[in-house]
Amino acid sequence: MTTILIVDDRSTNRNIYSRLAQAIEEGAIVHASASPHEALDWLNSSCPDLIVTDFRMPGMDGAEFTRHVRNSKNGADVPVIVITAYDDRAFRLQALEAGATDFLRSPVDHYEFTTRARNLLKLQRQQQIIKGRARALEQQLRISERSQAELVRNSRKALAQVIDTVPAMISASDEDGRIVFVNAYFAEFVNATPGSLLGRRINDVIRSDQSQLSKNIDTAVSRNKGEAASFEEQIADGSGSQRAFLTTKTSLREFIGGVTGILTTSIDITERKQAENTLRHIGLHDTLTDLPNRRMLYERVQQEIDADQGLFALLLIDLDRFKSVNDALGHAGGDRILQQVTSRLVTCVPDGNLIARMSGDEFVVVHTGINVAHDAEKLARQIIDSLSAPFLLDGSELKIGCTIGVTLSPSDGRDVEKLLRYADLAMYQAKAEGRNTLRFYSPDLESSSVNTISLETDLLKAISHEQFILHYQPKVDLGTGSIVGAEALLRWMRPDFGLTSPQTFIDIAEETGLINEIGAWVLNEACTQAAAWQSLGYGPFQIAVNLSPVQFFRQDIVQLVGETLERTGLRPEHLELELTEGSLLKDVERTRLTLQQLKQLGVRIAIDDFGVGYSSLSYLKNFAVDTLKIDRSFVFNLADGTRDEAIVRAIISLAESLGLKVVAEGVENNLQLGCLLSHPCDEAQGYLFSRPIPAEAFGTLMLERPRYLFPKQGGRLRKAHIT
């Protein structure tokens, strides 16, 4: 049963080291002491297999404690690991000279702690096995004085045979560092025979990267007889390849005729080190892009802060429109885009600067060695230009772009968390100013962050306090000039702010999940109002309601729509649900089934903002849709012979061939209307007909029974009233 002694005056460290020690091997017994004096008292009556001690303790430091351990009856040969936060070599040598076996840097890496402790226990047991066998052989020597000489010869031969079977390099050298014994493993490693190595200096035979440290330890071990010390080194084998070894040195008597020598045991840990390096790389790098991850980013920024070598910048890069790409192409396509982004960043960013992936579509560049803020701005603009160029994926070009927030240290601060938060604030401000740009952090952005938190708090109250209202924008039949429906548009009567557009709060509503409750309210309110207008005799009237992608993928969306129609009394064919292209392509199979179930209820489905996403004939063919709504960006500059007119004409032709209705959004002037009238566009909506207006005003408009008289191109729109 393995016994491990933990010595640390801090209870938190004792608890952590005790748990780690118990994980070294099953059934390990851990004794934890709060003071070195208490531990020494315990050591008088107990014999541990391993001791782990802190260096800095009140009353007695780790070096003095180790010296007492080595002078005790039960601690002379026990491996001692000293944990120290000091990086000064003098502290290490002080503990080494006192008899420490190994060191760990605080704060302790858990994997390194258990691995080093496990290796020392393994070495301790091997040495105990060797010493046990040596004692057994020594006992045999004493059985009979008459055969003592023969027993000595046999025991030495047996001991040599035992040592030759150990899979480690074992050697003995005299005080001058000359070899007096090597085992077969040692000789084979250096491509020599044991006899040819005798008398040679061990440092001439072994090509180690720690040769000077090895000499220092030899001196220390010779001076502190009976104490062992361990260290890691790289040793070149006969072919020149570097191998990693864990080497332990201890003093040796009698073996070379009564003169003190050094027994050296080196275990090959190359595979273990390679595994450690692999695990460390995995722990510090992003698996998709192989860029440093958040943990490595924090370490690097802290190093720059501690080095205090002058100005450096953090550039937080957030990809624009990546969510739409991911929704349309799936995670596999999105991952390939992220890998292309990584390649461009590596090309843009000078060597010596760190590029890290923070999260899904966020990257951070640690830009060092700059003199002024303009240096960081110059690099940021290069990155923006690089990522603004189209990305090629499976023969298709995609444009995403990026927005960058920049913070500087030490001028903006010397705390890693704060610097990253400042860069994040600057990035969101840049997005608010139009995306595909950059913004430096300034203290006034803190108030914007507070406003965001305030917005979320107010949004939580909006539903229960009945602060949401709906405005309605009429949809006009371009064949008859009659109002045939309306789109329900959400507005928020926010206290102290007045009427607030969804663009201000919809992202937060989706992030917090409030969009589900808000969307259900909008659906119920719109259906209730539409049913009321129909009951007043306004004739066939269709109400259009926008569905958020988050709301659409709720598992009960079909049930929600069905229950709302039943509760409000609105006929299903008079309800049209509007979805964006991105939401349709997020989960194609699930979307197809959901649309089928909604169509079975009898409602109509429209694709909103058609043309700006990833318009595909495949989903128009496979999804049960009824209407295409031409995005206002194509209508804005609409005129005969323009590129936008060609796009609108193509969309209308596509819809006509598939038997779909076409609605043009954002019609604001007679020129746009005239162009639409020259094509078979079914309906239109926009400020030319009416702004979105409250329900009461919309009811008044319907009472007038207006019919818009459409002019020929070049004329002006007129409105007639039907009595």
Image (spheres, grey):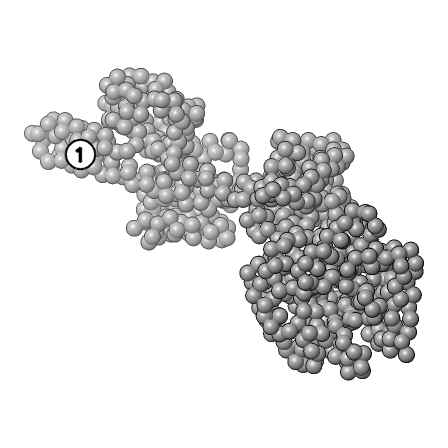
Position of residue 718 in the picture relative to residue 257 (left or right)? right
Q: Quadrant of residue 662?
A: bottom right
- At numbered mark 1, what does the secondary structure look like: helix, strand or loop? helix
Q: Which residue is mark 1?
A: 138
**Where does the C terminus fall, quadrant-wise?**
bottom right
In this view of the protein, can residue 413 be seen by the observer? Answer: no
Foreground: 122 or 44? 122
Relative vertical location of residue 93 with respect to residue 705 in this rendering, above or below = above
Give the number of callouts: 1
Residue 591: x and y in percent read: 59, 62
* Observer able to see residue 16: yes
Q: Residue at x 59, y 48 (%)?
A: 334
Who's the residue at 90% across and 61% down the image? 711
Residue in front for this viewpoint, 139 or 162: 162
Q: Position of residue 523 (x, y in %)?
A: 70, 72
In the rendering, at what x and y percent does residue 450 appear? 75, 57
Identify the residue at image location x=68%, y=50%: 321
The part of the image, by quadrant, that contains residue 295 is top right
Q: Is residue 20 positioned above or below 697 on the image?
A: above
Under mark 1, the amino acid is: Glu
Label 1 environment density (alpha carbons within 10 Å; few <14, some 14–19, many ≥20): some
